[in-house]
Image: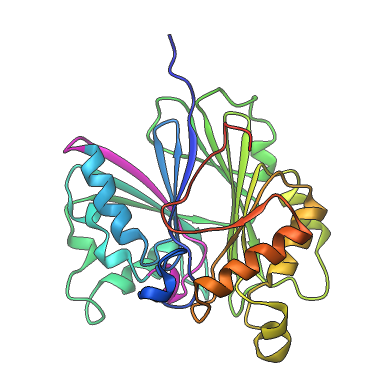
Amino acid sequence: MAEKPRFRVRFWGVRGSYPVPGTQTLRYGGNTACVEVDASGRTLVLDAGSGIIALGDSLLRRSNGNALHIALLITHAHGDHLLGLPFFAPLYEPTVSIDFFGPRLAGRDVEGLVVPVMSPPYFPVDIRQLPSQRAFYTLEDNMWIIWKPGCKQPLLLQENQAAWEPPPLPTEVRVHARFTTLHPQNGSLLYAIEHAGRRLIYATDLEWGEEYQSEMLAFLERADLLIHDAQYTPEDYQQSRRGFGHSTYEMAATVAQLARVRELVLFHHEPTYDDQKLERIESATRRQFSRSRLAREAMEIDLLVSP
């Protein structure tokens, strides 16, 4: 009998800008962006903020010395989304294969974005000399990554090529990448992960402003789970944070309504907001969009179980 499909999400880092350990961030957590997705045993990791450090230790414990294959999907190259990478323990293991995916920014492909973070003179260990196996895939706008059942190598297709693909098999995993300029200064990628008839969207580091682009709303349309940037309160945004490339919780809730998503998770929390302030944001968001909650470290969501 075939094993039942799995589609689970676990949050390892939920903050933006910089880590904030301490007693005031215990409930929601203080690590920066990192989300793990288990798609029927295929491990996808969204961003490499400080949360990826604990994730790496967990992955190695679970693999118990067996071969481990990881797909690391990077949205952009700002420090809070890469600062945990040098301390990601699977990089140092010969049994581990890591596929890096990410955008081309400022004329650099994804390898050119990642390697300087983990090589001299910025770090004493050179990623190019580590025993793990690594491959780098630079994504353009509207590209698809497809993992066929039983295949370790990803298939990369342009949108027009993906349209000719047959319907996905039950254990197939597909990722659709869209590039947005709504985050300064070079932009970032949004990711839609499709598996077992469900759709997860990771849309961090974007600022909607006064308008909601119809093309981007169409990309988010009817997601089963939307993880969305909501760094600021409307008051802070209006006073001093406009143009920083991040949304308010009101923007995120409006997008969830317009795109008719099933559930909204607010993400990339402002580091100066303590647990009490985040609780108030969660309550305010639910008044606008009832099927919403704030991301917190160690929170797990099973997309194959209806809320």
Q: Is residue 83 left or right of residue 253?
A: left
- Whether residue 70 is in magenta: the answer is yes
Relative to 177, does residue 198 appear above or below in the rendering? Answer: above
Write down the quadrant of residue 13 in the picture: bottom left
Image x and y of residue 265, in percent: 61, 55
The N terminus is located in which quarter? top left
Image x and y of residue 249, in percent: 68, 68
The C terminus is located in which quarter? top right
Q: Residue at x 65, y 38 (%)?
A: 161
Write down the quadrant of residue 127 in the picture: bottom left
Image x and y of residue 133, in percent: 25, 48
Q: Residue at x 22, y 56 (%)?
A: 89
Residue toward you, 38 or 26: 26
- Whether residue 58 is in magenta: the answer is no
Image x and y of residue 141, in percent: 63, 57
Relative to 66, does residue 184 appear above or below in the rendering? Answer: below
Relative to 278, does residue 261 appear above or below in the rendering? Answer: above
Q: Is residue 102 left or right of residue 51?
A: right
Q: Is residue 216 visible?
A: no
Residue toward you, 169 or 251: 251
Q: Residue at x 18, y 58 (%)?
A: 130
Q: Residue at x 77, y 75 (%)?
A: 209
Q: Which portion, as a residue range, is magenta?
A: 64-82
State how many labels appear.
0
Q: Is residue 304 left or right of residue 263?
A: left
Q: Is residue 91 visible?
A: yes
Q: Is residue 129 left or right of residue 221?
A: left
